[in-house]
Image (cartoon, rainbow, N blue to C red):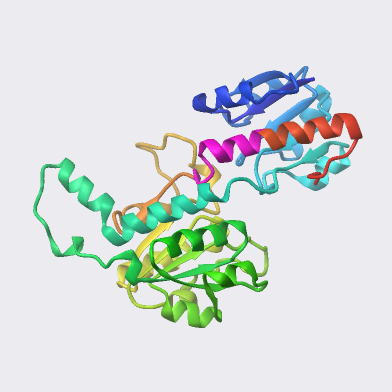
Amino acid sequence: MKLICYGVRKVEKEFFEKLNKYNYELTLVEELLNDKNIDLIKGHEGVMLRANCPANKENLEKMKNYGVKYLLTRTVGYNHIDLDIAKELGFKVARVPKYSPNAISELVITFAMNLVRKGAYMAERSREKNFLVDEYMFSPEIRNLTVGVIGTGKIGFTTAKLFKGLGSKVLAYDVYENELAKEILEYVSLDELLKTSDIISIHCPYIKGENDKLINSEFIEKAKDKVVIINTARGELQDVNAIIKGIENGKISGFGTDVFSNEKEFFFKDMRGKEIDGKVEKLLSLYPRVLVTPHIGSYTDEALTNMIEVSYDNLDEFLKCKNCENEL
């Protein structure tokens, strides 16, 4: 079985090779799938993608002509795949339904620590040999803050546990309450969470037409003054203009995000000296009150191992059983 994998960073190649227990004949491509490298698929029966690899109608039709039968994505989300067209063309498609929740949760803690304790700001000043201590550096301790977690699935629950371990009071809002989570947090209404929480972390799935731009003007207006908001879930859940306004008027003291709705236009690319979306440019200019990372929440050894292993297993299931537990 010849399997081509796109978006395999140099540090990831070792994992792809050592976890290849099925002895697939691998072609590892560092770049994401694009118009220039899609021809590399010729001669492969399987294709593995990652986020922001466009499996649109045009690319899927090319894959079909190249003889591809199996389409894998090593991600939970699959909005980069035109699933209707993929099914129409007869592809067997599978995803990775879950991976290490700690990967995302630890990034949330990193954001929180830097935004509350002003870590990035202090390190930057020290790098410039400015060792004066100013009022902006003064901060509360995390254990004295209330954290609101919106969405208490595996990642949200893990995030709650990490904050609880730091001594924070943890509140949560979810349409479906997690009974196990009640041991460490208190479920409240969304309005109660917003007006009470010093830190709000978003972990709910994006449901088109239902929670688009969840973090909007009304959300921010209801939030506690000087709130810190962190989004490591989906870019579609945030209204960038409303967030910019909230930071500029002081309602939001810090904002951290790993995602944007239009991130494929600039994430995983060197955009130095180039223009990107004006709203994103403005948000970036608000550093250090705003911290942005390029969708790397799952960029850890454990999460990567989970994603590769499950993807390899998915393909093996297709080959042996004609169907797969994680089939889309």
Task: Kindly give the residue lying farthest to the right in the view shown.
Answer: 322
Check residue 300 for magenta coloring.
Answer: yes
- The residue that appears at 43% across and 61% down in the rendered structure is 165
Q: Position of residue 298 (x, y in %)?
A: 54, 43
Compared across the picture, whether 279 is left or right of 129 comes to right
Quarter of the image with the N terminus in it: top right
Instruction: Residue 51: give x, y in percent of width and height.
Output: 61, 41
At 45% across and 55% down in the image, what residue appears?
Answer: 108
Q: Quadrant of residue 31?
A: top right
Residue stretch rendered in magenta on the structure: 295-308
66 sits left or right of 242 in the view: right
**Can you tell which quarter of the image residue 72 is in?**
top right
Task: Residue 180 in the image: state x and y as whole percent.
Answer: 62, 67
Q: Is residue 313 above or below residue 145?
A: above
114 versus 190 height, above or below: above
Residue 170 among magenta residues = no
> Which residue is at a point 34% across and 56% down the rendered structure image?
113
Horizontally, is 281 left or right of 18 in the view?
left
Q: Is residue 222 visible?
A: no
In the image, 198 versus 38, the foreground residue is 198
